[in-house]
Amino acid sequence: MAQKKKKWGDRPDAVWLKDIPSMNRIMPGIMPNRADNEAFISVDVDYAPLKAYVDKKNGDCDPADKYTFFHLIAAAIGKAFVLRPRMNRFVCNRRMYQRDKITMGFTVKKQFSDKAEEALAFFEYGEKETLDSFHEKIVKVIHSTKSDTQVDTSTGAMDLLCKLPQWLLNRIVDFILWLDKRGWVPQSIVGSDPNHASIFLSNLGSIGLEVGYHHLVNWGTNSCFIVIGKKHMKMIHHPDGTEELKEVVPLGITLDERIADGYYYSGTVALVRKLLENPELLEAPADTPVEYTIRR
C-alpha cells in the first residue's frame, strides 16, 4: 500500500481524509463515539469448500502447523481489505483517516483451561500476501504468542501500569485516552493491541461457542470486529424454491457505519463469500482482482 507524504493533521499510522463527501465529514462531529455507530452484519459461509481445501493443504503438513478454516477466513478478509480500501478507514477525534497499513489482531488463549492467561497477537497483512505466506506468518505469531517466555508489548505495558495505586492508574489512563485520540500513544503501549488493528478477529468456534455480536470500543482505531462461531447445520433456501441442508460457518461482523455506506459493505461481504467458496483464489497475491456479484 503506497504511503502518502505526511501533512499537518495526519497521524503516524494514517492520513487524514479531507476530500470526502460532506456527510462523511460531518457525521464524526455529530456522532463522535465509535461505539454509537455500530452496524452488525450476519453471514453464513458454506463449510464444504473450506473443509475440502483445508484437507488438501494439510496432506503433508506438520500437525502443529496445519491450515485451519480460521486461517482461510482471516486471509479472505485481509484480501477484501486490500481490494476494497475504504474498509481500512477509521474515525478518531472527529476526523476520518485512511490507514497506512492493513493489520490484524486477536487474542490467543495460551492453554484451554480456566486459569490459563490470554495474550495479544498483532501483525500486518501485505498487498502481495498469498495464503501460504499468510499461513506462515499467522502460525509463527500464534506459536510466539503462546510461549510462556513471550509477553506482547501491550500486555507488558498494562502489567506495569497495574502496579500503581488505583487513583494514579485512573489519572494515567485518562491521559493515555487523550493521547490516543491524537495518535500519540507510544508503540510500547499499543504496539500489539488489537483495538488498534484494521481487523479484530475472535474465533469463538474454537472454544465451542455460537457466533454473536461484539461491540466496537472508543479506545483505539478498530472499525471492524469479526466473530467466527462454531459450524452448524442450516437449511439453505435457493432462488428456485428448493431447499438444502448444509454445514455452515457463521460470521458476525460489527462495523463503524461512518467509514463507508451499506452498498460498499455489501460488496465487501460478497467478495469475502466468493473467496471462501473458492479458497484457491487466496493463492494469488492479495492485490489480484476477483470478480464477484452482490446477491439480491
Image (cartoon, rainbow, N blue to C red):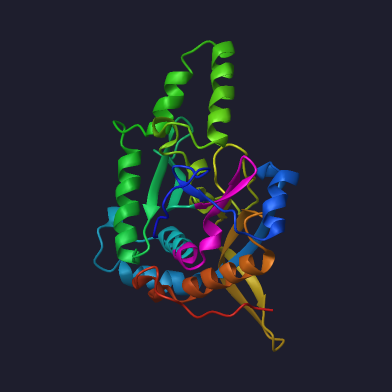
Residue 243 appears in the rendering: yes
Looking at the image, is 5 positioned above or below residue 296? above
- Per the image, is 92 magenta? yes
Side of 241 relative to 138 (left or right): right
The one of 11 and 177 positioned closer to us in this rendering? 11
Side of 145 relative to 260 (left or right): left
User: What residue lies at 36% left-to-right and 59% top-to-bottom?
Assistant: 126
User: What residue lies at 70% left-to-right and 58% top-to-bottom?
Assistant: 22
Instruction: Estimate the x, y position of residue 140 in percent, counting from the top left.
Output: 29, 49
Residue 201 appears in the rendering: no
User: What residue lies at 46% left-to-right and 14% top-to-bottom?
Assistant: 163
Instruction: Estimate the x, y position of residue 240 in percent, counting from the top left.
Output: 69, 89
The one of 283 and 126 positioned closer to us in this rendering? 126
The N terminus sits in image quarter:
bottom left
The one of 147 and 132 positioned closer to us in this rendering? 132
Looking at the image, is 182 positioned above or below residue 2? above
Residue 82 picture quarter: bottom left
Residue 191 picture quarter: top left
Looking at the image, is 1 positioned above or below residue 194? below
Instruction: Estimate the x, y position of residue 219 in percent, counting from the top left.
Output: 58, 36
- Residues drawn in magenta: 79-98
User: What residue lies at 35% left-to-right and 53% top-to-bottom?
Assistant: 138
